[in-house]
Amino acid sequence: ILNKPRGLYYTIDLTNLNIHDTNTLERIEKAVASVIREIIDNLSLNNKKAFVVGLGNSNVTPDAIGPYVIDNTVVTRHLDLMNALSDGFSSVSAMSPGVMGTTGIETYDIIESVISKIDVDYIIVIDALATTSIKRINKTIQITDTGIKPGSGVGNKRKELSKKTLGIPVIAIG
């Protein structure tokens, strides 16, 4: 009906919340973490190796959420490679590949190249969302286990990032 791949889709609507309140931000954080945990559990990815990818252009504020998340991601792959990863932590690698307009390289090609070199079990992709409703700006978080078509919200179609195209599960957060 929606012309989207079959999978799990979550929308966290923050329209009626004061997102400048610390307690509210903590509740939002817990809700997002709960959804991500549910998807990871559903796909049997607990204790598996994650690759977090932040899409977007760090020089363009409305498109900088992906790179911002990467700047604030705790990476642990280097510890796992040294057998120094503490119990309860998973191996996490992260990168922000930039955008084709600044790199000249298709984002898919960068990600596919990296996962062919490092051992990861799944990808979490973070990207800004486009909307036609001003009410939804900074007020909606969408999470899915079907991957993402970067740029599709603004008519800038890039290669799809999904299990179908990359061979491993792709969780998308927008």
Image: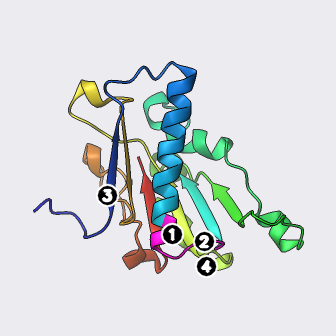
Q: Residues within 10 Å of mark 2 (few under 14, many from 20)?
A: few
Tell me if label 3 and label 4 are in contact, CB under 8 Å.
Answer: no
Q: Which residue is mark 3?
A: 9
Q: Residue at x 25, y 25 (%)?
A: 134
Pick whichever of labels 2 and 3 is earlier in the sequence: 3
Element type at marker 3? strand
Tell me if label 1 and label 2 are in contact, CB under 8 Å.
Answer: yes
Q: Which residues are magenta?
A: 40-48
Residue 5 position in % (x across, y down) = 25, 68
What type is the residue that disc 1 sits on?
Asp
Pick whichever of labels 3 and 1 is earlier in the sequence: 3
Marks 1 and 2, how far apart at CA: 6 Å
What type is the residue that disc 2 sits on?
Asn
Pick whichever of labels 1 and 2 is earlier in the sequence: 1
Marks 4 and 2, how far apart at CA: 21 Å
Q: Which residue is mark 2?
A: 46
Q: Residues within 10 Å of mark 3 (few under 14, many from 20)?
A: some
Marks 3 and 1, how far apart at CA: 15 Å
Q: Which residue is mark 4?
A: 116
What type is the residue that disc 3 sits on?
Tyr
What type is the residue that disc 4 sits on?
Ser
Tell me if label 1 and label 4 are in contact, CB under 8 Å.
Answer: no
The mark closer to the camera, 3 or 4, is: 3
Marks 1 and 4, how far apart at CA: 25 Å
Pick whichever of labels 3 and 4 is earlier in the sequence: 3
Which one is nearer the viewer's eye here, 38 or 117? Answer: 38
Q: Which residue is mark 1?
A: 41
